[in-house]
Image (tube, rainbow, N blue to C red):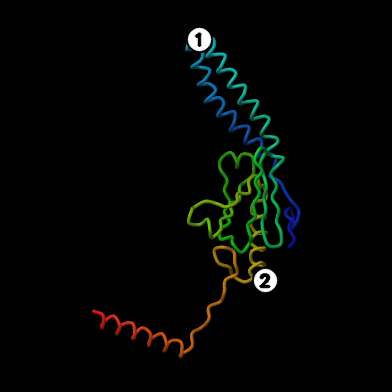
Amino acid sequence: MKSGHFSLFTPFKPDKSLVSMYHVLFVTLLIVFGGILLFAGYHSGSGILLAGAIVAVLFLAGGYLYWVGRYYQTIFFELKDDEVTWRRGVWFRMTGIVPYDRITNIDIYQGPLMRYFGFSSIKLQTAGYSAQARSEIVLEGIVEAEELRETIRSLIRRSRVVTGPSDATGTPAKPGIPQTSEDRLLGEVRAIRQLLERRQQS
């Protein structure tokens, strides 16, 4: 499977503009909630409360700056011949695996900020997650989203040709065994016997 940007067994990361979007979102939240804290501390007439509000805002800003760069460095996605894998996390490391034959939907999402920074998110939904109306994996910060979706689609088709269709758990589905005329006749005789037994009991 050849792809211009997404090769098998080659981990790839989100575009760096994902961090820029995080900066915009954080600054917006900091202005809103930090402004409320500082406004309340200033108008409380208490120097202690104002100082506490300033320390809280600085603590949040410092914690974010420490976290965001490290978080971006931990994000990796990888296409393998039979599954998609991902990993991320600073304090709590998370990894995931989704076999291609479990994927039911591949959706591309792009909000206003994503459109401004020029990337999208790809949401992979599986049979087990369809009832929950949420995605099992979100590949965020993808600039070549259409190319990645088509690459995954082709890998899904190839996987199903090799392994055949699967059930909701990813286990290859077992083909149904056709009933013979003797099986059908035996089933009818059993149904008649059960009907007669119920009538005798009543």
Q: Say if mark 1 contacts mark 2, CB within 8 Å.
A: no
When the figure is inspected, residue 89 is found, relative to residue 44, above or below; the finding is: below
Q: Is 77 positioned to the left or the right of 185 in the image?
A: right
Point 56% across, 43% down: residue: 111
* Quadrant the N terminus occupies: bottom right
Point 57% across, 14% down: residue: 51
**Label annotation for residue 85:** none
Q: Is 130 positioned to the left or the right of 7 in the image?
A: left
Depth check, front residue: 88 or 20: 88
Point 59% across, 22% down: residue: 57
Spot occupied by residue 96 in the image (x, y as percentages of width and height): 64, 52
Q: Secondary structure at mark 1?
A: loop
Q: Which residue is mark 1?
A: 46
Q: Is 109 positioned to the left or the right of 143 in the image?
A: left
Q: Is 176 positioned to the left or the right of 92 in the image?
A: left
Q: Which residue is mark 2?
A: 162
- Sooner in the amino-acid sequence: mark 1 or mark 2: 1
Depth check, front residue: 66 or 194: 194
